[in-house]
Image (cartoon, grey):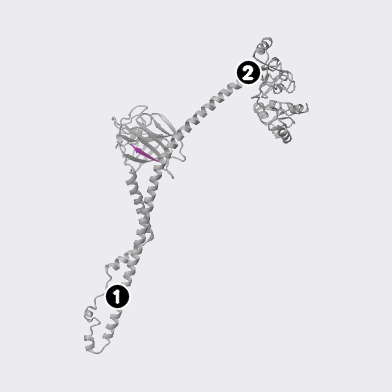
Amino acid sequence: MASAALRDELKCSICLNIYRDPVSLRCGHNFCWGCIERVLDTQEGSGEYTCPDCRKRSKERPVLQKNRTLCNIVETFPPNPSDDSEEGVKIFCLYCVDSPVQAVKTCLQCETSLCGTHLQAHNKASNHVLAEPTASLENRKCSIHKEPLQYYCCEDAACTCVSCCLVGDHRGHNIELIDEAVKKKKEKLEIVLQEHTVKRNQIENRSKKLKKCQEKVQKKSVTVQEKINNLFTYIIQQVRNLQNEIINSVNSQELDISNIIQHLETQNKELSRKIRDIEKLCNTTDPLSVLQDKESDGGDLCHSGKEYKPDRIFHRLLSVAADLDDVIIIKNVQQRLFNIVNEYIKREYHVPENALIPLNEDSAGNNLAVSECRRTIYWTEINQNRSENPESFNSCPQVISKCSYPSGRHIWKVETSGSGQWRVGAAYASIGRRGDTSPIGSNNKSWCLMRNKDRLTAVHDKKKTWLHPTSPLQMILLYLDYEAGRLSFYQLCDPIRHLHTFTASFTEPLHAAFYVSNDAWIKIID
């Protein structure tokens, strides 16, 4: 009996179960942390908070203090099976004395469990509240009045008995029948369930798409890594060869100079010896000794007026020594390295050069100005009064390139304004020239990147894909691979960033297309 009395003291007055994470209010009453949080949430906006037990009022939300002593008692208190789920426990009919029959319902008023037969007789005699079969009715009764919990207080978010509603703590509150409260809560749960189901389906769809994308990336990654490895292997080998070539060239020049210096020093010694011999002869008084001397090569003395001049090798070496500058060498290395990478990429990958795309001024709209070099376009309020022709976009400030691209791979670079509305992309020559569907992206014959009100979208046939660049968009690279059916847009920043790729089966030659409005401008970069 003492254990049962203690168990009642350890029950939360809101959920009527043993405390879970018990906390205390300033008034001293204890509740489960989750239970009192829900009650306080329902009192938000009412202007005051009240304790579910003593009804003490507070204008500020009460601070919950963990009751450590009560926590320790609850943790050491032996659990009651009736507090938890009764799955696996068989409940028998109270009236089937001779042979036990499993109960189908429990009457909360009568506190009896009934089988199907006795339940029919019970329902004819009275209209009591029935619940699933249970062996313990304590958690279904009011802890104060010991009456069945038949009502629900919306303000305190607690189940109550009829006495609590009439004369107890919940008097004057918004009270509902339990069935009505359950119905409303289930309706809310259905809405939440639908929202969660939709979110789960979205997550599953995104996960499937990402998994497919991951498979493609994994397959392509092997090829890309192989190509990159080949590229760097080639570059490293060529760089080593270039390094050896330049170092050998510098060393060779140094050796050439050293050899010539040695040769000149030998000549200098020989000339010094001859000078001494000649000086000796000049100082000799014996005429016969002077004339008979052959060793001094006196035959060359008659040309003594001729000066010794440096040969061509001497001049070349002087020039080499003057040009042997580290800045010049590094500049040469820079150009050679660029040529190595550029030639390899051209040979192996056929990367296209930046396409020259002069604009077709005959196609320009009347509110679009074109520069003399036909590389820059900008929107203007001044009507250009261009002559009517089948090619012009009279309905919008738009222009297409003069040349078309029926095949191959091409790159265009453009610079865009930071304000106004602009579109850059590609279109068939058969695109409409009149009406609301003539701007690129507004029909099925064009593809574009559009900026409008600081928002960036990829548009085709009026279908928009929102993009989110990490920095302001100024320089854009457009890459067309006609045979592969791909038109890609990249942001030229450090590092270069992919924005969007359209995929399609192109059926006509494509033209570069540009649209500007509201003080916007676009510049084509060669």
Dominant SS type (magenta): strand
In front here: 396 or 222? Answer: 222
Query: Callout 1, which amino acid?
Result: Gln
Q: Is 141 above or below relative to 415?
A: above
In front here: 347 or 420? Answer: 347
Query: Residue at label 1?
Result: 267
Is 262 on the left or on the right of 81, as rendered?
A: left
The x, y position of residue 431, in whole percent, is: 32, 30
The x, y position of residue 263, in whole percent, is: 31, 72
Disc 1/disc 2 C-alpha distance (Å): 123 Å
Q: Which mark is residue 180?
A: 2
Q: Secondary structure at mark 2?
A: helix
- Magenta-drawn segment: 474-481
Q: Residues within 10 Å of mark 2 (few under 14, many from 20)?
A: few
| Circle 1 or circle 2, nearest the eye | 2
Q: Please state, as top left, top right, bottom left or bottom right, where the N terminus lies in the image.
A: top right
The question of residue 477 being in magenta is answered with yes
Q: Is 300 above or below relative to 93?
A: below
The x, y position of residue 277, in whole percent, is: 28, 83
Query: Callout 2, which amino acid?
Result: Glu
